[in-house]
Image: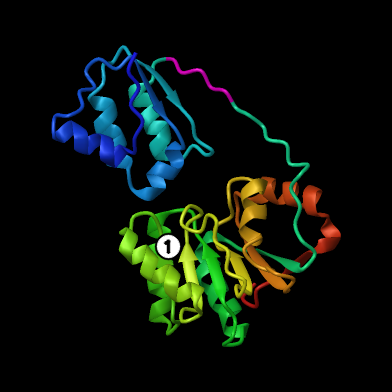
Amino acid sequence: MAIVVGTPGRVKDHMNRRTLDLGYVEMAVLDEADEMLDIGFADDMEYILKSTPSARQTALFSATIPNFIRGLIRRYLDNPRWIQLVSDTKGLETVDEVDQIFYDVASQDKADGILEILDDLDGGSQILIFRKMQIGVDRLSKGLAGEGFAVKGIHGGMSQSERNRVMAAFRDGRLKMLVATNLAARGLDIPTISHVVNYDMPENIEEYVHRIGRTARMGKRGTAISFIGEWDFELYEQIIAKVGEDKMIKRKFSFY
């Protein structure tokens, strides 16, 4: 038995150089498929699967199932068996030093909402804004820059050198505002972050706790602001059950 483990980009590179032949693959495993999509490996994943025998067994693991992943399942899996694991959230805790603020806002009003929030902050604030997709990061960072804010975006579709430059500027305080995907901000530990904004809510409560934990580091106070859209109320109910309504601050935008 031979096992090949690699990133989609490196596997495709070996295929193109004819140092790897997938014509005899009996099982293909896509791990963290949604994160590979976020990094920009969508075309590579499809290229690799097309190059393997149709009779292979396929296992796909993903924390979320975006439309592209559903498309892969329809095209490359026959009669798939779905297994959903429900995680235990008992060990998840939010710290009391984070003020958790929630706004009900329609998708088309989020841009006005973020401008209202940013206009109320002082110049010393350091802000991390979360979006779900790379294109959302690009659009929001460009839109805010057009409004005069010093802001950069970061996501897996950028080169490593670009990400390093942006992260270095944010880490040393030269950059005060960063728009990021979950993956790009994974493991981020910068004690000067004063505000986290969930422009797009995460898929689950674990990711919510991870996101807001980027602020209130080293005993400092921090603020987490969440935009609750039309499709976020199930997660919002989970947050209420986990955090407690007494710790949640509800606010309304002036345009409502």
Residue occupying the point 39% across, 42% down: 36
Using residue 51 as the reference point, say whether residue 211 is left or right of it. right
Residue 80, horizontal then vertical, whole percent? 46, 18
Against 139, is 87 above or below?
Answer: above
Q: Which picture quadrant has residue 214?
A: bottom right
Colour setup of the view:
rainbow
Quarter containing the N terminus = top left
Residue occupying the point 86% across, 61% down: 246
| Number of disc labels | 1
Against 125, is 156 above or below?
Answer: above
Residue with the most extreme left position: 17
Residue with the most extreme bottom position: 123
Q: Main secondary structure of the magenta part?
A: loop
Q: Which picture quadrant has residue 113?
A: bottom right
Residue 78, horizontal then vertical, whole percent? 39, 16
Q: Which residues are magenta?
A: 79-83
- Residue type at mark 1? Val
Which residue was labeled with disc 1?
137
Q: Which picture quadrant has residue 68?
A: top left
Q: Residues within 10 Å of mark 1 (few under 14, many from 20)?
A: many
Residue occupying the point 76% across, 61% down: 95
Residue 58, horizontal then vertical, whole percent? 40, 20
Q: Is residue 81 magenta?
A: yes
Residue 109, horizontal then vertical, whole percent? 54, 67
Residue with the most extreme front position: 1
Quarter containing the C terminus = bottom right
